Amino acid sequence: MDISRRELFVTGGKLLILASVGATFAEITGAAPPGEPYRMADHWWGMLIDIDKCIGCGSCVRACANENHVPAGFFRTWVERYQVEEGRQPHVDSPNGAMDGFPPTARTDLKSFFVPKLCNQCADSPCVQVCPVGATFVSPDGVVLVDESYCLGCRYCIQACPYGCRYLHPAKNTVDKCTLCYHRITQGLTTACCENCPTGARQLVDFKNPRDPVHEFLRKNKVQVLKPYMATEAKVYYKDLDGSVR
Amino acid sequence: MRQLFRDSGHLIRPAVVLLAALGVFLVVRTALIPKAFGKYGHFSPAALDVIRQRPLVYAGQEACVLCHEGEGKERAAGKHAHVACEACHGPQAAHANADDPAAHKPALPDVANLCRRCHERDAAKPAGFPQVATVEHSGGMLCNACHQPHNPHL
């Protein structure tokens, strides 16, 4: 086949552009294994928590412990009860992480409410920044995870988390934390805590899904993240969060 | 040429040592770092697959009503329409995914504690949520003596 020098350059240039576009596309979309419809690049997970709907039943705590085999006395999620009196430090209790719910409050004249807590799935997470070995990371779909085969158990991340959401697994001696039920959400299910919340106070959301109700929720409600001054880009949004919550 | 080697030997010898050290470093580095490390960031992408392969414990709402259609309809008509089956009946993936679900029969819920966790009166609960002081309300009788839990009207 005879081709002129001009044709060679033009065809070569086209091929080069095609190849680079193809490579970039594969990079952006995240190469899913064959047969798997889940694409990491199509998701950006977070959670909405509606304080006014939480009844402190502890269903989420029990569900999380069952689903993720959380050892007794440790929590990936827990519920706190705040009782706030004007001019005083708030009284906070969480008996066994609310695993068995709460006994009724002693006083009924205080501003009181429940606050479910879990890993805030920070996009700019302090725990990831301090890990010396790359064992904890933000996945391409926005979930902070721990690679148990890499974790040394040095506990830097436990100290770095401003929300106290990590613990050292007593049997594995590696760090454990909320995975946002990564094994569930990547197959189209919701998290164990959201599945079992009887009032819908917790909602798993996908910020990259244009049809997700999160967009309307954030447009219509006053929301806040925990400790916004830490600039962690937390993705767990609380509706009607009181200023006393830490 | 020989003169040149003799004169610059003090440069060539350390250069050879450095190159050998670099070679050893690269070999060790390749052996220690997993193949795809750094593909998405400073971590091993294999960890994502390991975490994704953890087994389910809660089967999920849709799995339950596939078989228990009647209970699903009864519940949908009442106040518990948005309470998931497993919130009261416990984790049932073993039951739902079993070849013989009857062999993994779920235990009956512990009514004495179950209902109270949500419905015992507490000042911290949202005002609109139905709550009772159980001692005054029923005097120790079990809730399901009067209420049908799937559709808890009287």
Image: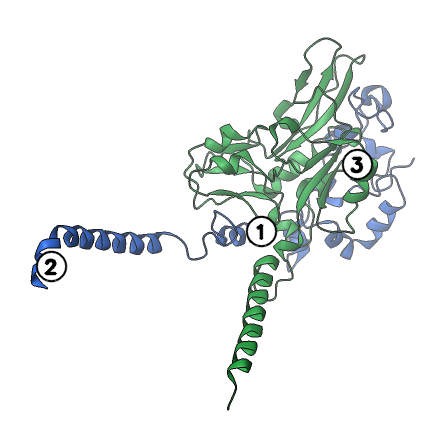
Chain colours: A green, B blue
Residue under the point 84% across and 26% down = B131
Q: Which of the two residues, B135 or A16, is positioned nearer the viewer here? A: A16
The amino acid beneath tag 3 is: Thr
Residue A191 image offset from top left, x and y in percent? 67, 44
Residue at the top extreme of this rendering? A87
Q: Nearer the viewer, residue A76 or A49?
A: A49
Residue A75 sits above or below residue B75 on the image: above
State the CA–CA distance, disc 3 to disc 1.
26 Å
Quarter of the image holding residue B110?
top right
- Mark 3 Cα-neighbour bin, 10 Å: few <14, some 14–19, many ≥20: some
Which residue is located at x 42 percent, y 41 percent?
Answer: A133
In the rendered image of this protein, does residue A47 appear above or below residue B32?
above
Task: Give the class, few, some or many, for how many residues have Cα within 10 Å of label 1's Cα (few <14, many ≥20).
Answer: few
Q: Which residue is label 3 attached to?
A: A199
> Identity of the amino acid at label 1?
Pro
Dividing the picture into quadrants, the one containing residue A111 is top right
Determine contact: label 3, label 1, CB under 8 Å. Answer: no
In front here: B129 or B20?
B20
| Residue B75: numbered disc | none
Report the side of B21 relative to A138 (left or right): left
